[in-house]
Amino acid sequence: MRRSIVGAAVAGILALALFPAAAFPVLYIDINAPGGKRMPIAVAEMVTSAGDRSLPGAIPKIIEADLALTDLFDIVPRTGHLEPVTPAHFAGTPLSFPAWKVVGAEAVVIGKAEERDGQFTVEMRLYDATQGTLMAGKRYSGTPKQLSSIAHRFANEIVYAFTGARGVFGTEVAFTARQGRGKELYIVGMDGKELRKVTDNRSFNLFPRWSPDGQWLAYTSFRTGVPVIYLRNPSTGSEKEIVRYGESKAPGGFSPDGEWLYYSVSMEGNSDIHRTRVVRGQPEKVVQGWGLEVSPAVSPDGRRIAFVSDRGGSPQVYVKTLGSAEEVRISHGSGYATSPSWSPAGNRIAFTARSEGRFAIFTAAPDGSDVRQVAFVAGADCEDPSFSPDGRYLVYTYRKRGYSELKIISTDGRRERTLVSGLGDVGSPSWSPGR
């Protein structure tokens, strides 16, 4: 997406790979192996040689918390570390790897930080303690407010070094929650921290959807008295009106290149799926029928679209190949199915469907085969799934007796945690792309 549409810019973190040879991942952990071995890893205290030493001191704790969320690592308690890390370890003096193995660490993370004129330089290294080899090394430059992001970025480097798959630390989830008589947009980090309100207009603001570059949110707002789809930069607050025509309307998602926004719009009581170019252009109708067609979700390759239609008598999930008449129904429950979300690899579609009288989260192949139930709770509803950028997790809405939460669950259903609780009527979660 061209960022010039509302003229916003966001300052970034400068990152430098220190050791090119360490850029190739070595597969130590099979993330697809159920019950596989966890990697014992030690994250040492930061070495701070200049400037404010308190701020970068939080980096090891953030990295530890991130790695613990993956269920792939066991954190070696810092109180048991035997070797203090010093500036000399960044100037050629090797670590005493036997000392780290004695405390049970098979991998060691060390880091140092310097502050000059309000700018931090942070160097992070990951070692294989068993072989005594460097696995990853990065140097970052950023402001004090970006130290958390720097920690998340190196945690992603650690996951990549051990698994060959990019981590999702530093990504965010957009969602809606009740505020007074209306609903506002919120964003929260995938670790449950840094919750912030995006809108504050005391109206109904619904269906947030991230652009592929993570810079924009498409959403529907009723603040002018009629539903309008806007694009909003959550960092700057700048906005652009995208869709005003029609009656009810809701964004479904962007094309992979960010050029198109797909949405459902109702005209004369019939809802179809349209798309329009984010930067200029006339809307086009891409799915239509005598039923109600809603909730479009574009595949990662941009060639197919999943959507919901009641053309068969009840709302079900279909997949259409764009530019052709080919459509396949992939949900076949007795109740109704809705809220499709594509996995980043394009090989699974998550959706909400009825199961034993409640709503549950399922995934299926794009041809409707290999249906798997991922999240189900007796006496509660699990709704509105959205895939993480690495495809390993789903965020969804949990509802029970007027209470609601956002939860994150692994796609095999084995690991789950609460992401957001304490807000009213939370829903419509949308996981941001990788950073």
Image: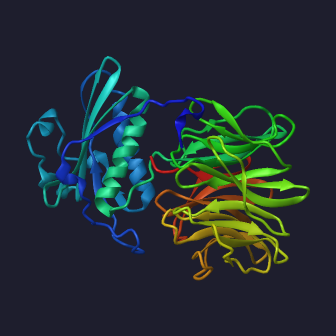
Q: Position of residue 163 (x, y in %)?
A: 33, 63
Whether residue 403 sits left or right of residue 104 in the image: it is right
Q: Where is residue 15, by image quadrant? A: top left
Observer able to see residue 423: no
Relative placement, left or right, of 85 versus 430 is: left
In the displayed image of the protein, which residue is found farthest to the right?
268
**Model colouring:** rainbow
Q: Nearer the viewer, residue 113 or 346?
A: 346
Q: Give residue 162's position: percent from left, percent from top.
A: 30, 61
User: With respect to residue 17, does 320 lie above or below?
Assistant: below
Q: Nearer the viewer, residue 207 or 248?
A: 248
Q: Who's the residue at 53% across and 39% down the image? A: 2
The image shows residue 263, relative to residue 226, as above or below, that is below
The spot of residue 9 in percent (x, y) is 50, 30
Residue 7 located left or right of residue 263: left
| Count of labels in the image | 0
Instruction: Tell which residue pokes out farthest to the top in this image.
Output: 117
The answer to which image quadrant residue 117 occupies is top left
Query: Where in the figure is residue 48, as x and y percent of width and height?
Result: 25, 29
| Residue 248 visible to the viewer | yes
Report the residue that reaches farthest toward the left.
Answer: 93
**Measured along the vertical axis of the image, is residue 126 above or below residue 195?**
below
Q: Quadrant of residue 406?
A: bottom right
Q: Residue at x 52, y 68 (%)?
A: 346
